[in-house]
Image (tube, rainbow, N blue to C red):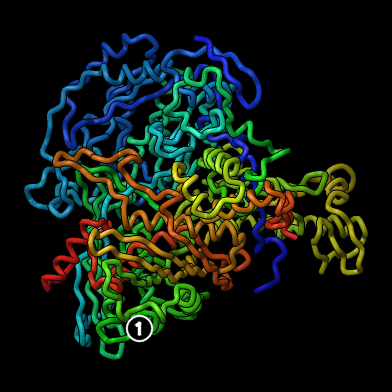
Amino acid sequence: MKRKLVTASKSVKKVDALSMATGRALYVDDFQVPGMLIGKVLRSPHAHAKILKIDASEAKKIPGVVCVLTHKDVPRIPHTTAGQGYPEPSPYDTFILDNKVRYVGDRVAAVAAETRDAAERAIRAIDVTYEVLPAVLDCERAMDPDAPKIHDEDDALRIPDADRNLAAEMGFTIGTSFFEKADYIFDRKFVTHYAQHCPIEPHITMAYFDEQDRLVIRTSTQVPFHARRIVAQALRYPLKKIRVIKPRIGGGFGAKQEVLLEPLVAALAVKTHRPVKIELTRAEETSASRTRHPMVIHLRAGLKKDGIITDLDMDVLSNTGAYGSHALTVACNTGSKVLPLYRADNVKFDAKAVYTNLPVGGAYRGYGATQAAYPMECLIDEMAERIGMDPLEFRKKNHIQEGESSPVFKQLGEGREGVAQTIMSCGLDRCIDLGAKEIKWKEKHGGDKGKGPLKRGVGVATLMQGSSIPGIDMGAASIKMNEDGSFNLLMGATDLGTGSDTVLAQIAAEVLGVRTEDIIPYSSDTDMTPFDVGAYASSTTYLSGMAVKKAAEEVKAQILKVAGQMLDVDPTGSKLQDGMVVLPNGRRLTLAEISLQSLYILDQHQIMGSSSHITTASPPPFAAHFAEVEVDTETGKVEVIKYVAAVDCGTAINPRLAEGQTEGAVLNGISYALTEEICFDSKGRPRNSTWTHYKIFNAAEAPPLKTILVPTWEPTGPYGAKSVSEISINGPMPCLANAIYDAVGIRLTEAPFTPEKVLKALRLKARGRRTD
Amino acid sequence: MKLQMKLNGQQVEWEVVGNELLLDLLRDRGFHGTKRGCENGDCGCCAVQIDGKTLNSCIYLAGQAQGRAVTTIEGVGTMKKPHPLQTALVETGGVQCGFCIPGIILSAKELLEATPNPKETDIREALDGNLCRCTGYTKQFEAIKNAAKVLTGKKPRGSKAASGGGK
């Protein structure tokens, strides 16, 4: 039911922003524990090798070195670092340390020392004898009969076909008459590349024993509860003796869903019984943490002359690298978050994820939808052009609308069958209209591009994502009332810089009729807060927000009951507003009065409530993105002149934070499309692991970004909200590709769109050849 | 060796070793607002002002600060008395994870000291040594423009925009 909102639609200040802006906020490395050891990891120089022998005797002699761990010193328990709910859909193909290395950068040994200098010297002093094996460096050859077997260990679990390097497989077919009714058939192959999340704070974890000898893990994570469970599993350590705390963290974008350092740091702490921390270097972060799965996507589509799409056939080959983290679910998402956007009678989807001896894929904002929106939106552009229809009209004619469903929702979930759902809110048409106006589509699209070497063009992409994983994700919260009418809000939800502590406090404040600053959020501490799956799958506002809302409503009911007792009236119909209860007869009581009564005087009890929330829906947010680019036909350089993102995220609980999510995602997507790429030499060694050579956009290069929030009301979300964080990273690659086509007539099917690729395509076009 | 410098207005004398980086020294002494992001001079989240000029403390030896005046984020403003740049970044939503913010504030501070009425291109250039992965920079440009107006008296301190009350 739609209602006027007091707090849950306002751009209140982020609750932790001033602490961050004054340098007070405590991130993992800002917390000082006396006697802290510094941990470092010895990494493989080979893409694929057996470890025959490790001699750490010289390393142990270095003054200050306290501990060296090799695969012989840690429990050998297959697990996944994916940081997903239990039971995980990713294969158990990882060990804390192993007797084999599977990519350049894989772990060989770990050291803990009194100083960083000693730890680094010890790493260099460890003598390892390798038997170097042939490596798989091309994902399209990974399943060849003669390809080396990457996971030949016999104790890995749930690898679908280790003999063929197959880490995951999923598919479905809807319809039987493929391409029978189509007047035109489109068929293209698209290639995406290795890219990294680049949180400005790299992965960092510290572990120490508290005064009760419990193991405290302070870590930069998106999934504190999964981290606790996975550390307990991988170390065979009692879960009840582990406390995981997520303090402020310096960005994650999916990379920190990975439970990457926690088991290793915990193993060092357990071995030494000393505080230990490991912080990745930037080079380790780039190529030895997690990446966006590179993909080869083959998309075929059928179209009738009247503009009806008849068929969509998507074939996905995902490169999961050396380990199968998120292999299945990212591959599934390429279909489930992209195919339902357009109606088609026949839909076929086939996805495989293969192992290679390259860095490991993981969760990355967009989660497969980013890779698949690229072929889909480029082909949609091409289809519209073929029948001479404006790309905006073509999209409006074919995209899913409010009240409609797609059979894809039921066919394809996250690693398993999905959940049928009907779209309850869709503002996509309005997103298209407002975005087109802002970019001046009618004036700029098509037409004569002039004679000079600089050509301008505009492009569009339309998008959908989801809001949480239906039937799987769960979030919980509890709220208790204090004497002054303030409330402690305890929740498992994980704020990784996104502002979820603020947004969730706003939701509680809305229910309880108080200011946001009267809500004191505390989140993500496995000893102190209720459970939450964590910050992933665009779930926090939608799912955890609903848990907070329900907990607050329980507290509200208790407050009204006490108010009724105090005044001896029936409180039915009372309201909470401005920190007071307003009874139907006009009498008012402050929350402080009520709290004091309940704690000290009348029917003494703590006013508190808790709630969990799970959802069977995952309502998609929608977006229309527009870009204007200028292509230099002499150098091949593409410059983004302006970028517009019109987004339907339901109610934006905090519009400024929602805009900020959109702008950050867009710029990340733009540099992914244009400059970001981890390159490798012929032996699988990364060539550009620092930001000097791995190019993310700085302030001078960022194009003007315009965000337009298009409000709708999602009935299943808290106060009409859907998700916003991921969707907008999916737009730039297809949007820029389409804009480049409008400018210079080349269709780029291999990302990123570097000057070299643009020039090559321009030259092919000049010679009258196809450019893809 | 003994390092004498003026840190956030206070004279300090600290023992340092020859190859110690200013970043490590500051963080070890509790000035943790200066962040470690890349240790390669690329990201700027370790930026401090040295004699008024913004530099990356991850590629600056502590000993080089001998006799100089160093300002860290802790010397710019406090939660009780924030600098207009800090207030503006909070109000505009220019702070997300916050990890890059101390460095961005020090870069912006240097800019506004030299150019009180900056154009957007000035702001973009001043920030080109600071990487932010969360915001797309848009709200940070807006914040710095707002702070410039406050510092030049064109706008009152503590504007009403985006107040915390939600009323």
> Which residue is at the far bottom?
A306
Q: Residues within 10 Å of mark 1 (few under 14, many from 20)?
A: some
What quarter of the picture does the C terminus of chain A occupy?
bottom left
Using the rendered image of the protein, determine whether residue A537 is visible from the camera's viewpoint: yes
Inspect the image, locate mark 1, and give the three-letter code of the amino acid beneath it: Asp
Evaluate whether residue A333 shows in this view: no
Q: Is residue A170 left or right of residue A479?
A: left
Local SS, label 1? loop
Residue A340 position within the rendered picture, expressed as x and y whole percent measured from the top left: 37, 73
Locate residue A604 relative to residue B107 in the image: left or right.
right
Q: Position of residue A407 (x, y in %)?
A: 36, 75
Residue at the (52%, 38%) spot, across then down: B103
Q: Residue at x 33, y 24 (%)?
A: A110
Quarter of the image where one finds residue A368? bottom left
- Residue marked by disc 1: A390
Work out whether A65 lies above or below A383. above
Q: Quadrant of residue A393?
A: bottom left
For the point 52% across and 17% down, the residue is: B66
The residue nearer to you, when weighing B27 against A5, is B27
Foreground residue, A593 or A371? A371
Quarter of the image with the N terminus of chain A is bottom right
